[in-house]
């Protein structure tokens, strides 16, 4: 140890010797007797266009908005429930009514609080995310720092978001692509019904932007899927999400071994345990807070995915700018972001993330930085 390191270590040692067991950081903005209280309400997010993926088409998404009040501070969160994931406003509110946050003295003990909530019942991933997001927002407000600072991330290293085009007839797809703000650098094209090549040709007739493609488990045959992936690569696709149903593990792995572009898991990987179970099956993973149970597990999954040498994308459901801005704070760590969800809705009740030529701009306010409109 050189002299400088020794002095540094010695200084740390003497500082530590003053520590008497009292909390080093008391949440400064609340009365010592303050307690967290959770409230929630249902909300319907209306979409600008009918949104089609391989399994369904819809015009709205059920949401539950959460607030955690602590003294004068409020942390905001949400659960978004696209129907194919199996949660509903009723199931989320039933779960949330079992959560008692008033028993915790310190709202910054997120590991303990979120582990307790996770243990209440299996599943309920979106319901759990709605608490995780609000707690992270509150923690940032208590500390007076935006989440990217708390995680030690550089807010200028955010990626460009993709802009998503749902499945439709080739004519409508062409029209939707023409309507996209030209400043977005990447398009995400939903595939997986029976008109994949017509859709790609329709897109290519009006745009030469790189394409993120997503079959949403819509393909059933690995040889045909691989053929289509070669066609997509020739037409400027940079990746393919979830080519086959999640149950077809060996066939998805077969495609990954041969694909000329990265194969990214979405429906196959919800939580950390799935990521570990699917090691080697995909080149990468698309993380969404409504699958991962929120920011805390998503952050851990990024670390594990990187240790496995995997690519990482952060996506979203159709959510308000609350959930989407929360996810955006993790984007300095990832390869791709699919965070256009709030742009697809017409009654967003939060202001948060913005874009500059399609690049994600994080708000600088403490916590998530999403503000009710
Ligand atoms: Mg997907």
Image (spheres, grey):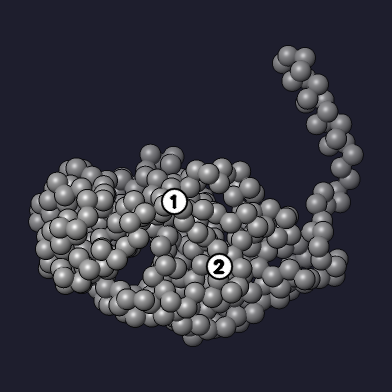
Residue 27: where, in percent of width, then height?
79, 59
Left-right relation of 3 to 251 = right
Locate residue 266, reporting x and y percent: 34, 59
Q: Judge from the rendering whether residue 363 lies leftward or rightward of residue 285; answer left or right.
A: right
Task: Report the residue marked by disc 1.
Answer: 359
Q: Is residue 373 above or below residue 265?
A: below
- The circle on residue 351 is 2
Quadrant location of the C terminus? bottom right
Foreground pick, 239 / 217: 239
Q: Is residue 276 visible?
A: no
Q: Residue at x 67, y 72 (%)?
A: 68
Element marked by disc 2:
strand
The residue furthest top is 2
Pointers 2 and 1 in contact (C-beta within 8 Å): no
Residue occupying the point 69% across, 70% down: 74
Which of these two is toward me, 120 or 31?
Answer: 31
Distance (Cα) linking label 2 and label 1: 17 Å
Residue for point 64% across, 79% down: 39
Q: Quadrant of residue 259?
A: top left
Callout 1 secondary element? strand
């Amino acid at each position: 140890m050189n002299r400088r390191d020794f002095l540094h270590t010695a200084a740390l040692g003497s500082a530590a010797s003053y520590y008497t067991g009292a909390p080093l950081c008391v949440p400064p903005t609340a009365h010592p007797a303050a307690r967290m209280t959770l409230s929630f309400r249902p909300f319907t997010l209306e979409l600008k266009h009918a949104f089609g993926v391989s399994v369904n088409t819809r015009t709205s998404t059920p949401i539950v908005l959460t607030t955690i009040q602590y003294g004068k501070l409020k942390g905001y969160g949400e659960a978004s429930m696209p129907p194919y994931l199996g949660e509903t406003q009723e199931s989320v509110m039933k779960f949330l009514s079992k959560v008692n946050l008033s028993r915790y003295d310190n709202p910054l003990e997120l590991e303990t609080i979120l582990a307790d909530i996770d243990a209440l019942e299996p599943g309920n991933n979106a319901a759990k995310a709605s608490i995780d997001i609000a707690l992270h927002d509150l923690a940032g407000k208590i500390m007076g720092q935006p989440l990217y600072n708390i995680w030690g991330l550089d807010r200028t290293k955010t990626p460009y978001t993709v802009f998503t085009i749902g499945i439709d007839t080739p004519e409508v797809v062409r029209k939707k692509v023409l309507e996209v703000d030209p400043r977005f650098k990447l398009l995400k094209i939903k595939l997986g019904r029976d008109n994949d090549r017509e859709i790609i040709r329709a897109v290519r007739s009006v745009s030469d932007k790189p394409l993120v493609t997503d079959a949403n488990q819509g393909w059933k045959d690995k040889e045909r899927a691989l053929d289509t992936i070669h066609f997509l690569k020739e037409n400027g696709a940079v990746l393919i999400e979830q080519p086959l149903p999640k149950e077809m593990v060996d066939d998805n792995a077969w495609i990954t071994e041969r694909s000329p572009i990265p194969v990214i898991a979405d429906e196959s990987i919800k939580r950390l345990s799935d990521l570990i179970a699917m090691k080697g099956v995909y080149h990468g993973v698309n993380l969404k807070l409504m699958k991962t149970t929120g920011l805390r597990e998503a952050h851990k999954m990024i670390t594990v995915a990187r240790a496995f040498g995997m690519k990482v994308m952060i996506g979203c459901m159709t959510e308000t700018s609350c959930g989407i801005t929360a996810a955006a704070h993790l984007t300095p760590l990832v390869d791709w972001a699919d965070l256009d969800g709030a742009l697809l809705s017409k009654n967003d009740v939060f202001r948060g993330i913005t874009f500059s030529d399609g690049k994600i701009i994080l708000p600088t306010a403490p916590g998530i930085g999403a503000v009710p409109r």
